[in-house]
Image (cartoon, rainbow, N blue to C red):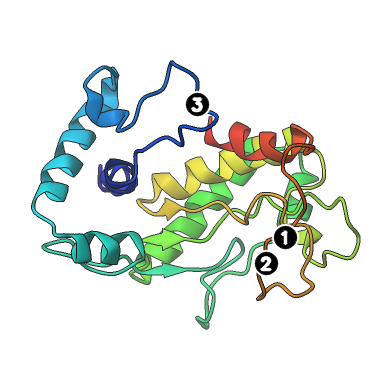
């Protein structure tokens, strides 16, 4: 239940929907409105809500940026999709591109489970994995081999299987990278120009993440 509680902590604090483009079906503080049936998530929501009520603003900010707050201990987070980065004597799994060529979701789920077990054995709570972006639309990216390929459906299906495997080991999977992250050039910089307007983005740019989450 811990991963679910952690995921909901951020939602509880920052559950405000941007009103500019929102329809009348959405309201500010959506989860706390009491109008949403959370089903199996209700217990996790209640626990997260109780924790948030005990925190001050500084503690809340610390938690959502990877630190500790109140009685909540910081998560240990580490890359990568192929092994626990920076550690010696760990398994190095095939790159995502190679695994996707098997077309075997069961194999990839087993890989995720085994990798998750290694992360957990090292005391790591959250793995920066799997890699779903870039989709490989640009040959200049340099990281295509880490992903499950340029096909959004294949990428999402394989990524979803990997997520199930990592989660089964008690480790939180954190899919990456940012949507539309299709290049490595100047990766440490930022600016309003970024990757261009989002309005013209093809739906396939987002569907790999959507499929993986489902």
Based on the displayed image, in which of its 4 quarters is residue 62 positioned?
Answer: bottom left
Furthest residue in direction left, as rendered: 54
Q: Residues within 10 Å of mark 3 (few under 14, many from 20)?
A: few
Looking at the picture, does residue 156 appear above or below residue 115?
above
Residues at circles 2 and 1 in contact by the CB criterion of under 8 Å: yes
Q: Residues within 10 Å of mark 2 (few under 14, many from 20)?
A: few
Residues at circles 2 and 3 in contact by the CB criterion of under 8 Å: no
Residue carrying label 2: 191
Instruction: Tell me residue 198's x, y (percent).
Output: 72, 43
Q: Residue at x 62, y 56 (%)?
A: 177
Looking at the picture, does residue 80 appear above or below residue 131?
below
Classify residue 98 as left or right of residue 122: right
Instruction: Tell me residue 67's x, y (percent).
Output: 29, 69
Rendered image: mark on residue 22: 3
Based on the displayed image, in which of its 4 quarters is residue 30 positioned?
Answer: top left
Q: Residue at x 61, y 64 (%)?
A: 82
> Which of these two is toward me, 62 or 72?
62
């Amino acid at each position: 239940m811990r991963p679910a509680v952690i995921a909901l902590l951020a939602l509880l604090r920052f559950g405000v929907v941007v009103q500019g483009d929102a329809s009348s079906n959405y309201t500010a503080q959506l989860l706390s409105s009491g109008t949403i049936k959370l089903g199996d998530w209700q217990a996790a929501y209640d626990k997260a809500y109780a924790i948030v009520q005990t925190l001050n603003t500084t503690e809340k900010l610390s938690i959502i940026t990877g630190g500790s707050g109140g009685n909540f201990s910081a998560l240990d987070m580490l890359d990568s999709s192929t092994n626990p980065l920076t550690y010696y004597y760990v398994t190095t799994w095939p790159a995502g591109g190679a695994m996707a060529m098997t077309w075997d979701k069961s194999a990839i789920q087993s890989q995720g489970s085994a990798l998750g077990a290694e992360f957990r054995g090292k005391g790591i709570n959250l793995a920066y994995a799997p890699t779903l972006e870039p989709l490989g639309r640009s040959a200049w990216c340099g990281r295509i081999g880490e992903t499950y390929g340029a096909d959004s459906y294949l990428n999402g299906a394989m990524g979803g299987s990997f997520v199930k495997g990592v989660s089964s080991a008690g480790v939180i999977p954190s899919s990456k990278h940012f949507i539309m992250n299709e290049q490595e050039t100047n990766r440490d910089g930022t600016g309003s120009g970024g990757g261009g307007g989002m309005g013209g983005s093809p739906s396939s740019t987002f569907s790999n993440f959507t499929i993986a989450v489902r």
